[in-house]
Amino acid sequence: MGQIGQAVATQQDRAAKQPQTIAGFIQSMQGEIARALPKHMDADRMARLALTVVRKTPKLADCTPESFAGALLTAAALGLEPGVNDECYLVPYGKECQFIIGYKGMTKLFYQHPMASYIDAQAVFENDDFDYAYGTDPYLRHKPSRGDRGDLVEYYAVAKLSNGASAFVVLSPAEVKALRGGAVGPSGKIKDPQRWMERKTALRQLVKLLPKSTTLASAVESDGKVGSALNRELPPAEPQAPQIAPTVETEQGTVDASTGEILDPDDYAAPPDEFYDQGGAA
């Protein structure tokens, strides 16, 4: 059983022995949170953020301890703060707590890679000046129209690396809808006039083409899953290079020990897209 699985089992044992409030449960997790967090982050702050999230979304208190602990410890292991700057979210889905990475959380993890230079995702409207081409001489140009931009026609995500290389993906609204399991726009009462949820879908597809640290690879794998499915050990948020071997073997594939980059991305299977948007979250 991995670090998260052991922590969850510990919390389940405590919950079974005596009833406690969600606040008491979170406080009792601080030791596990501290062990999961990157060194530069604070366990007390993460616990306070979790309490704030529960106050704002009371239904989280009805989630199973296993599910809530799995989602919270996954956020901690990835170095993402729930409810802060749209980095990640803990979302009640019946009795399960669902872990959702936000647009900014995914870009934050991308920028931790030493080759990261620039990343963005945008919506394109019919009156915009937009053109692109794939192939041996790819390019993408987008100049938003002033005033009425017309109907939405495309989404795209683009990234540049420090070595000058770049990559992009362009998706139609129908393709984004299919990737989101048929969902369009936000769920519930959340307003999303800037189409962040659809733009994140384009970003998620782009990440598959980019050099990834083990942390970002694990984030993509964990995104949209419920906490009870996250009872496994995640790679540390700040992977340490070994003293001898230049590469190491992990569950995700061969990893460059100096950068944390997965050297065999084709061997890494991203999760099915139906995991991505359960319950209308994005």
Image (cartoon, rainbow, N blue to C red):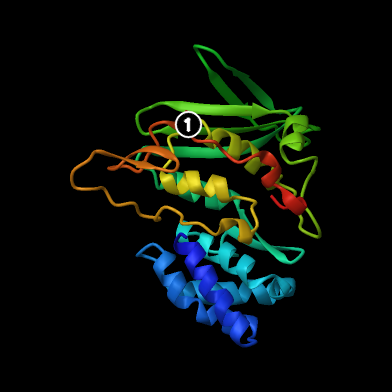
The amino acid type of the residue labelled 1 equals Asp
Write down the quadrant of residue 15 in the picture.
bottom right
Q: Nearer the viewer, residue 94 or 211?
A: 94
Residue ID for mark 1: 267
Would you say 218 lies left or right of 92 here? left
Q: Residue at x 50, y 39 (%)?
A: 119
Residue 167 showing in the rendered view: yes
Coordinates of residue 139 in the picture (x, y in percent): 54, 19
Q: Secondary structure at mark 1?
A: helix
Q: Quadrant of residue 236?
A: bottom left
Tell me where residue 72 appears, x and y as whole percent.
56, 66
Using residue 248 as the reference point, say whether residue 61 is left or right of it.
right
* x 46%, y 54%: residue: 234
Residue in the picture at 55% in, 75% down:
11
In the figure, 195 relative to 263: above or below? below
Where does residue 58 sit, x and y in percent of width and height? 73, 75
